[in-house]
Image (cartoon, rainbow, N blue to C red):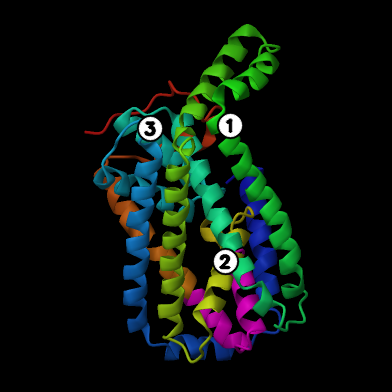
Amino acid sequence: MKRWQFWLGIAISALFLWWAGRGLEFGEALHAVREANYWWILPGVGAYMVGLFIRAWRWHYLLRPIKNIPVRKMFPIVTIGYMGNNIYPFRIGEVLRAFLLRRKEDVAVSASLATIIVERIFDGVVMLGFIFFNLSELGRLGGDSGFIGNIRQVALYGTLAFGGALVAFLLTAMFPSMARAVYTPIINLLPKALGEKILNIIDKFMDGLACLRSPKDALMIFFTSIIIWLLETAKYWFVMHAFNFSVSFFALMLMNGIVNLATTIPSAPGYVGTFDGPGIAVLTAYGVPHAVATAYTLVLHIALWVPPTILGLYFFAREGLSWSEVKAWQESDDLLQETAPLSQPN
């Protein structure tokens, strides 16, 4: 908690919460929370957990060129990673699952981190696809906050960022020798010991991009990512039925795309504020009363946070992990150190 990154995340979350709460009638929002039919959350959780299992399968697919690890072994690691993202700031859960994979399956941390970055790039592309798919409808929406009017610009910059990263990774994966010819002379300018260490890390990172060398595999990862996010949108749809409002599934796709792009912004643990503010803004632009939109977004956020966190904590305990290990990884000055000490499972 002494790190400046933590306090930066708290400040950003506070700013988003202030934005989301402007003009809110808290009594009306509390009434909407009390009147909700929470049975609708159960099928939503079911859809989300299916999506979580498919995430484990996707990671298994990404890792196949490095090591063929059964999905049943990947699922607990993925769940622990999502738990880590929910309770630690700055997505430390991604690093956590990379270390867990080395701990259990002896896969190089830098290689597994490469596959995780590929996951996130494809996720970002799908989220932008959800936004672009609804841009024509978005143009007809209201909203006096200026948020809606800026979505097109955000989508443009996001496309340049995620699309550029995807193209760069595809080219690097397809032409590894050419890529090495570019970065090796630059790294050789460094002191020999440091240069050799960095080259070793980058070579293992390149191994993690092997899944992109086949167009068929890249398309499979892309379509799997679409299914994952459609299932998460289904959870939005189920939870919506617990409240007294209705928007189209496409509107919820748009909300899903916007809020998940917003959660890439540093924030407090659990994406507090960065999830809620944009979600409320999208719903109010669709004419949903502010209090109802706030109550729905709050309940949805909790419903998205609790199941993977509880399940991740269960797997965390079952693996015999300790929070001191996680803290050591988080505070390490060299998270890619392949020889960092890790206790083995019992």
Q: Which residue is mark 3?
A: 65
In this view, the residue in front, 156 or 274, is: 156
Q: Amino acid at mark 1?
A: Thr
Q: Secondary structure at mark 2?
A: helix
Residue 328 visible from this viewpoint: no
Residue 201, image x, y percentages: 52, 23
- In the image, residue 294 above or below residue 1: below
Give the residue number, with chain letter if any, for mark 2. 130
Q: Amino acid at mark 3?
A: Pro
Q: Magenta span: helix, strand or loop, mainly?
A: helix
> Along the horizontal axis of the image, is 210 left or right of 3?
left
Q: What range is drawn magenta here?
A: 274-299
Q: Tag 3 or tag 2, which sits nearer the N-term?
A: 3
- Residue drawn at (69%, 71%), measured in percent from left and top? 18
Image height of 150 relative to 93, above or below: below
> In 3D space, how far apart are the residues under numbered discs 1 and 2 (Cα atoms)?
27 Å
Task: Check residue 1 for magenta coloring.
Answer: no
- Tell me which label, 3 or 1, sits earlier in the chain: 3
Q: Is residue 147 left or right of residue 132?
A: right
In terms of sequence position, does the residue under pointer 1 or pointer 2 come before the other?
2
Percent position of residue 200, x then y:
52, 18
Residue that mark 1 sits on: 172
Contact flag, marks 1 and 2 (Cβ < 8 Å):
no
Question: Which residue: 39% across, 24% down?
Answer: 341
Seen at 51% across and 29% down, the residue is: 205
Dividing the picture into quadrants, the one containing residue 179 is top right
Q: Quadrant of residue 141?
A: bottom right
Q: Is residue 285 left or right of residue 76?
A: right
Q: CA distance from mark 2 to mark 3?
A: 30 Å
Q: Is residue 196 above or below residue 58?
A: above
